[in-house]
Amino acid sequence: MTEGARKFMNTLAEKYVKAGYPHHNSWAFSPSSDEQVIFNELKARHYIRQLTIEMCVLTETGLAEIMENVPMSSGARLLLEDLKRQYVAAGYPQRRNWAFAPNEDGEEVAYHELRARGWIEQRTMALYVLSAAAQEKVMQGVGG
């Protein structure tokens, strides 16, 4: 990746985190005229895709690239540990049938971060379920 593209991805990561980890398909941004070459590189790498003539969004690959370089917040880490404990205490229900929701407004950003990291999946506007990756991680820690 070129230095310009790397810097742009770092800037995009900062803005993404500051925006509260919105869903990558709805969080749009626009290239400036001097960034067009960088946007072309990022599109070629499948990190971004054109949404409209003027707007782009992150792809799954682009989101993964950003999240790989952003340390997990303490709020998200605590929420993930709490969800793991609750899942075990609930008797390991089928993950797609075991739904949960933020308890307070402050938790929403942590939920969005865990969704962006692939640990939970959003089912409705308010309900989430564990991802297959999270369920596997929970099971690796059981009895070990």
Image (cartoon, helix red, strand yellow):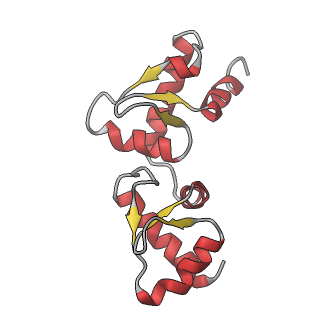
> Left or right of 86: which side holds 42?
right
User: Please, which residue is most extreme toward the top here?
Assistant: 91
Residue 92, given in percent of the width and then of the height, sits at 59, 14
Quarter of image, res 16: bottom left
Residue 61, given in percent of the width and then of the height, sits at 61, 58
Query: On the rendered image, what quadrant is the C terminus found in?
Result: top right
Residue 46, given in percent of the width and then of the height, sits at 63, 65
Query: On the rendered image, what quadrant is the N terminus found in?
Result: bottom right
Q: Residue at x 59, y 73 (%)?
A: 42
Front in this rendered view, residue 18 or 124: 124
> Left or right of 32: which side holds 137?
right
User: Please, which residue is most extreme toward the left here?
Assistant: 105
Marks counted in the figure total 0
In this view, 64 is above or below 54: above
- Observer able to see residue 75: no
- Observer able to see residue 57: yes
User: Please, which residue is most extreme toward the bottom here?
Assistant: 34
Q: Residue at x 42, y 68 (%)?
A: 52
Q: Residue at x 40, y 54 (%)?
A: 26
In this view, 113 is above or below 57: above
In this view, 92 is above or below 79: above
Residue 93, given in percent of the width and then of the height, sits at 57, 13
Front in this rendered view, residue 20 or 22: 22
In this view, 87 is above or below 65: above
